[in-house]
Image: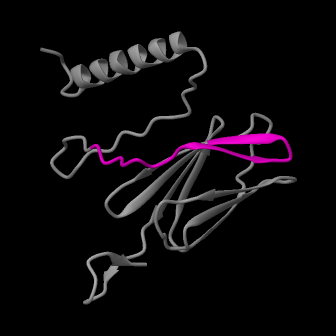
Amino acid sequence: MSDETGDDIIRNIAKVVENILENLQKEGNTRFIGCTVISGPDGEPRIFSRDIPSGRVKADSRELEYEIVEGEDVVYITVEVPFDISDMPRIDVSGRSVHLGFELIDYNIDLPCAVRSSGITKHLSNGVLDIVCAKEPVFFDEDCIEPVD
């Protein structure tokens, strides 16, 4: 048994991430943008991704790679920022899209659901931009089964 409570867990996570990165390199064209680990209230990790597209958006021949994960109440957006950019971009969130404005180039990323424009959190470090947006509440119409945006 280790001295610290979480040492074994951290060692296991490091081993899993190492294996993932090795396998990605073998596949050739796959790139690893970033990783976010989220635990539930009971300390157990939750997986809540749905078939949310990740992809690339292009502006002036410069591509921006991103990944979107939709949680129960929030949307997580991870963006690979061009290596020559170190300042936080302008981030405008409205409806179902996020607009990223860098000095000379602007990008738009479509989201799988409507998000609130206020209260977003953002963090830029080592070429990875993480954005967390609260989802807009979804209301149901009495006469239909589908949610109304």
Q: Is residue 112 above or below residue 45?
A: below
Q: Is residue 7 left or right of residue 50?
A: left
Q: Is residue 138 visible?
A: no
Q: What residue do we see at 30% from left, 18% from top?
A: 11
The residue at the point 74 percent across, 42 percent down is 86
Residue 135 falls in image quadrant: bottom left
* Numbered-mark total: 0
In the rendered view, tell whether residue 40 sits above or below residue 19.
below
Q: Position of residue 85 (x, y in %)?
A: 77, 42
12 horizontally vs 132: left or right: left
For the C terminus, the image quarter is: bottom left
Instruction: Indicate left or right for 99 with 20 as reference.
Output: right
x, y percentage for residue 57? 69, 47
Q: Is 26 placed left or right of 2 in the picture?
A: right
Camera-nearest residue between 18 and 121: 18
Tell me the colour scheme of the image: one colour
- Picture quadrant of residue 73: bottom left
* Residue 32 position in % (x across, y down): 54, 28
Q: Which residue occupies the foreground of this view, 36 or 1?
A: 36
Q: Which residues are magenta?
A: 47-65
Residue occupying the far bottom of the picture = 142
Placement of the N terminus among the 4 image quadrants: top left
Q: Residue at x 70, y 42 (%)?
A: 64
- Residue 28 vertical position relative to residue 87 in the rendered view, above or below: above
Q: Is residue 73 magenta?
A: no
Residue closer to the observer: 94 or 113? 113
Looking at the picture, how far across and down is residue 145, in whole percent?
26, 77
Which residue does the image show at 52% across and 14% down from the upper left? 27
Whether 64 is among the magenta residues is yes
Residue 119 visible:
yes
| Among the 4 quarters of the image, the one containing residue 15 | top left
